[in-house]
Amino acid sequence: QIHLVEFGGGSVQAGESLSLACVSSGGFFEYNTMGWYRQAPGKQRELVASAGPTGTLNYADSVKGRFTISRDNAKNMVYLQMNSLKPEDTAVYFCNAHVHFSALDYWGKGTRVTVSS
């Protein structure tokens, strides 16, 4: 069983930055793909960025060049640095752990990000 807890989030003005962090406990962190997803009101949850166990990074087109995902396997942490935030980035952001061995996904409870214009 993997337990994920997100930190960060909050309310900012457009153009500002925010950092999110997620700590993982349980399982084998270094073998999992860690990701950040978001869900805006009335919309489906979508992938924002992911970091694979071999270092592969993946970003949604909407955040490329603005967001950076990173992971620290020694600390079981994954981070999301969000720059040049836009009102359309407003959503609840969820940390995700994908366990390749079992194909199971684990989720944090989410942290809210609000960007005002």
Image (cartoon, rainbow, N blue to C red):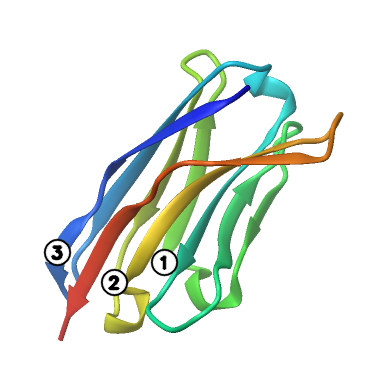
Residue 62: image location, x then y, percent: 52, 78
Judged by depth in the image, the label closer to the viewer, 1 or 3, is: 3
In terms of sequence position, does the residue under pointer 3 or pointer 2 come before the other? 3
Residue ID for mark 2: 85
Residue 68: image location, x then y, percent: 46, 53
**CA distance separating discs 3 and 2:** 11 Å
> Mark number for residue 101?
none
Whether 7 is drawn above or below 91: the answer is above
Label 2: which secondary element: loop
Looking at numbered disc 3 in the image, what kind of residue is underneath it? Ser
Residue 5: image location, x then y, percent: 39, 33
Which residue is nearer to you in this view: 10 or 2? 2
Which residue is nearer to you in this view: 25 or 30? 25
Q: Is residue 110 left or right of residue 53?
A: left
**CA distance separating discs 1 and 3:** 17 Å
Looking at numbered disc 2 in the image, what kind of residue is underneath it? Leu
> Mark number for residue 66?
1
Binning the other alpha carbons within 10 Å of mark 1 as few (below 14), some (14 to 19) or many (20 upward) gives some
Judged by depth in the image, the label closer to the viewer, 1 or 2, is: 2
Label 1: which secondary element: loop
Label 3: which secondary element: strand
Do the numbered discs 1 and 3 sit on residues whose CB atoms are within 8 Å?
A: no
The quadrant of the image that shows the N terminus is: top right
In terms of sequence position, does the residue under pointer 1 or pointer 3 come before the other? 3
The quadrant of the image that shows the C terminus is: bottom left
Do the numbered discs 1 and 2 sit on residues whose CB atoms are within 8 Å?
A: yes
Looking at numbered disc 1 in the image, what kind of residue is underneath it? Arg
Judged by depth in the image, the label closer to the viewer, 3 or 2, is: 3
Residue ID for mark 3: 11
**CA distance separating discs 1 and 2:** 8 Å
Which residue is nearer to you in this view: 96 or 72? 96
- Residue located 74% across and 24% down the image: 31
